[in-house]
Amino acid sequence: MNILKTYFSQSDLSLEEMRNKVSPNFDQFLSGEKVPSFNQLTKIAHLLDIPVGLLLIDKSVTPQKNNINFRTINSEFIANPSSELKDTIFEMKEKQDFLQKEINYDLDYIGKYTVNSPYLEVAQYTRNLLNLPIDYYRQSFGSKSKQLGYLRKKINKIGVFIFFNGKIKDNTSRRLNIDEFRGFVLVDKKAPIIFINQKDTKNGQIFTLIHEFIHLLIGDEEILGTQSSSANFDKTEAFVNKVTSEILVPDSEFKKQCVTIENIDNLAKYFKISRYVIVRRMRDDKYISSDDYNRLVKKFDKEFQEYQKSNKTRPGGNYRQNINFRIDKTFFNYVENAVNTRQITYTDAFNIIGVGYKGYQQLKEG
């Protein structure tokens, strides 16, 4: 347990305190002579104020020096990220650590552009890279889930791993808070990961997916928080939002429509995206003022809060379908291959994926 020794040495806790609160054998836990039980590890993690998952991986990660910017869409910082958010990030980092060992190639599009690049060029490159028609939204998807799946498949195909969840792993008592974050991205040339909060609307998830993918193109990690009526985005967010809007609502197509406040709902239906994206495009193209934009977003925020209340009462749905949606299929294939070639045990696989035997079997069956 050398990793435990590292975290303990960074804390202000004393050996005597740990002996009393955890176990008289704490010294032996530090030396590696004895191994703490999972319950003891949980207590240790609580005292050290770190996610328990950090004590189960083979290298230290200092939360205070995490590369991710804890900021929202309007560049406000998440000063005190919840344990659910932190544990989700570290769960994804563990998955990324595993994938980095399995993949032997680099993705040349990661960090290809900067915030000073022409946004239309980045948008067109994205369409070419994903083989995404400029008017993809005119297809008849049948449902928002299928539209999301279509875009996910496009991004999956070029090497990005995409995960969804509304809770910590399979723990229904630790739900993610949509008011805190909608998604985040972990940049890596071998195993880039996008995580999307499943508690969001499907329109919100579609926006987050494209938004976080653009962050990969500029090599920038971030956490996407809640929508805001603020127009004061920093340079990075302003650029990413501009490219995202161009992909979801192409300016050349937008100008062909009847762009009025009264027609916002119809525009959202036509482009198959949220009203937030439509009004942002309207503001950027000077169809409405910033005051109009702020007023409309506040109205949408209120309606979204009502959606959240009704969404809490929805049943859990089909477990098999949900877990196969949540876990990236290519990631699972890498894990299964590692099991089949005896690189890892089934127990290791369950821990890496974040499921039990039942969940593993459901993923295997597809």
Image: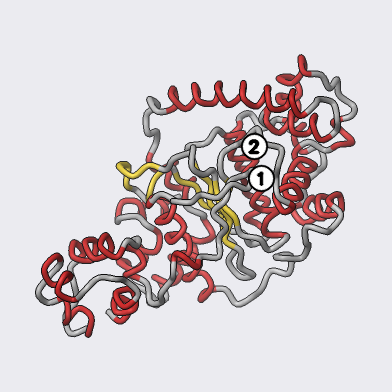
- Could you tell me how many numbered marks the image carries? 2
Instruction: Write the residue at 32% across / 61% down.
Output: 49
Instruction: Tell me whether circle 1 and circle 2 mark residues in contact (CB < 8 Å).
Output: yes
Instruction: Write the residue at 62% across / 34% down.
Output: 203
| Residue matched to label 2 | 147
In the picture provided, is 10 more to the left or to the right than 29? right
| Residue matched to label 1 | 151
Residue 111 placement (x, y as % from top left): 72, 65
Q: Quadrant of residue 230?
A: top right
Count neighbours of disc 1 (C-alpha within 10 A) and say few if under 14, some if 14 to 19, many if 20 or more.
some
User: Which secondary structure lies at badge 1?
Assistant: helix
**Residue in the foreground of this view, choosing between 201 and 354:** 201
| Amino acid on which disc 2 is placed | Gln
Instruction: Write the residue at 61% across / 59% down.
Output: 221
User: Which secondary structure lies at badge 2?
Assistant: helix
Q: Quadrant of residue 4?
A: bottom left
Instruction: Write the residue at 47% across / 60% down.
Output: 92
**Residue in the foreground of this view, choosing between 131 and 113:** 113
Residue 142 placement (x, y as % from top left): 63, 29
| Amino acid on which disc 1 is placed | Leu
Count neighbours of disc 2 (C-alpha within 10 A) and say few if under 14, some if 14 to 19, many if 20 or more.
many
Give the CA distance from mark 1 to mark 2.
Answer: 6 Å
Residue 184 placement (x, y as % from top left): 56, 52
| Above/below status of 118 relative to 204 | below
Residue 235 placement (x, y as % from top left): 74, 52
